[in-house]
Amino acid sequence: MKHNLKIIAAIIIIAMSLVILSCSKHSESVMSSESKRYVPNLPESDFNGYKFRAVTRENPPGTCTFNVEEENGDVINDAIYKRNRYIEDKFNVVFEEITLDSNGPLQEMFRNSVLSDSDDFDICLQINVEAYTLAVEGFALSADKLPYVDITQPWYLHDVNEAISVGNKNFIVYGDDCLSQYESLLILCFNKQMVSDLDLETPYDFVNSGSWTYDNFFNMCRAAAYDLNGDGKMTDEDRYGAVSYFDHIISNFWVCAGVQTVIKDSEGMLVLNMRGNEKLFSVLANARQNILGGSKILFDAYVDEADTVVSRTGSRRDIPTQLFENNLSLFYSTNLHMASGMRAMETDFGIVPFPKENERQGRYYTRAYGGWPQMVPSNASNPERTSIILEALAAESKNTTLNEFKEKVLTTKVARDDESSDMLDIIFNSVVMELGDFMWRETRDTLINEVYGDGNFVSAIEENYEIFVRLLDTVNDSVKKSD
């Protein structure tokens, strides 16, 4: 019996060893149980001081910086500095950042460089829509052409990358090195003092009980909306249930209900999912009825006139921030980047994910709307080297910059309590992207305009259906030609 037990134990040990070996290529390694440091499965490489060139936009919105030359005390800046020096030392490369003054020149430069077969750069950070367009047109390498980029690893946003793939290929990839993607996450800020003053149930309790739904959100908005100056009309001097602007709130109602206006067929090609989409119609009709069908609860900076509030930045997008800071709204639908800039607000506020459609919905969805992914030109001279550096950047970002980004959010006015920390975990773990919202303004804006218009979503979709289909066909045809 003892002999048999020894044999069984030996078999178990061998089997476990084989499992570990078989998983090592496609699973993260951890240096120690104490540090929980993620280590990518990359070959030892010495690139002999190679200058790894990244082209970026000068002064981009949010955290889109690829390289910094020195530490300055800012936690994100210093984390990028330490990450980059670590990778430079490990692979004997030197990071060089080249900046252009706006988005247009970035895209033009990328196209021209590939068309002329020039070796001008190794990667380029492009804003999401332009990155996607360049990629599916064949100007950038897809992930499967970058041998050491493994998007199954935990330092990539799996749900997002799956959503934006075409033909089962990932033409752009979001990893933890793309902090701008996290900054684009749409959240709801709420005024904690107003919740107390109006004797309302806190949104934290709704979220924790699974009952943070559109109905409860709208009920709270109606309770807060009030004509403060008593002039019989709602202006920017009055109090609202929510403030925002059209593309920071209306799209949320279908995306955060789990509705996709663009889906995939069995071959991974794009298919329009708007005709006969009853859930889409229902969600938008409900939003329209609540926003327009009764008391005015929403101030939309692109729909409503701001007569007394003057934008600090010259952009109407700044007005909702100011109204919320001035305690003129219970909720503010915005992204993490905008929320991080609310330094003038003295009243405490919390953050929660956007609500669910109803309690039957099994999870919360957090809408991702932007980001500046790293693009590799299709004429790259050494995709293997580039992929090693990109994989190292993504993995090391999970160890350093992403943690510092989360910590900075938690130690600013965006989240100053334990509940907000818990909410941030839910937000970061529920990220989704919807191609019909993310990629094409034609599809997105048709739906948004109809919310503020006649509400005839079926007719609006039919009127534009062929246009929408052609947009998808252009992408599908480009992907097929790239095979």
Image (cartoon, grey):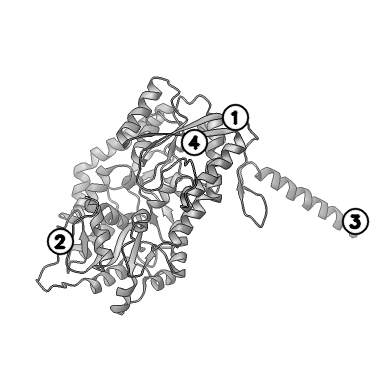
User: Which of the two discs, 2 and 3, sits closer to the camera?
Assistant: 2
**Tag 1 secondary structure:** loop
User: Which of the two discs, 4 and 1, sits closer to the camera?
Assistant: 1
Q: CA distance from mark 4 to mark 2?
A: 50 Å
Seen in the picture, residue 396 relative to 121 is either above or below; the reply is below
User: Which of the two discs, 3 and 4, sits closer to the camera?
Assistant: 4
User: Which of the two discs, 4 and 2, sits closer to the camera?
Assistant: 2
Label 4 sits on what residue type?
A: Ala
Residue linked to disc 1: 47
Q: Quadrant of the C terminus?
A: top left
Assess disc 3: are there few (<14), some (14-19) or many (≥20) residues with their C-alpha within 10 Å of its C-alpha. few
Question: Which circle's residue, 1 or 3, is located before the other in the chain?
Answer: 3
Residue 457: image x %, image y %? Answer: 21, 52
Assess disc 2: are there few (<14), some (14-19) or many (≥20) residues with their C-alpha within 10 Å of its C-alpha. few
Identify the residue at horizontal 58%, vertical 42% (top origin).
Answer: 86
Seen in the picture, residue 472 relative to 195 is either above or below; the reply is above
**Tag 4 secondary structure:** helix
Question: Which circle's residue, 3 or 4, is located before the other in the chain?
Answer: 3
Query: Which label is found at residue 308?
Result: 2
Question: Which circle's residue, 2 or 1, is located before the other in the chain?
Answer: 1
Asked if residue 97 can be seen in this view, the reply is yes
Label 3 sits on what residue type?
A: His
Residue 442: image x %, image y %? Answer: 25, 43
Identify the residue at horizontal 45%, vertical 38% (top origin).
Answer: 170
Label 1 sits on what residue type?
A: Phe
Question: Which circle's residue, 4 or 1, is located before the other in the chain?
Answer: 1
Residue linked to disc 3: 3
The answer to whether the residue labelled 2 contacts the one labelled 1, judged by CB atoms less than 8 Å apart, is: no
Residue furthest left as drawn = 231
Residue linked to disc 4: 143
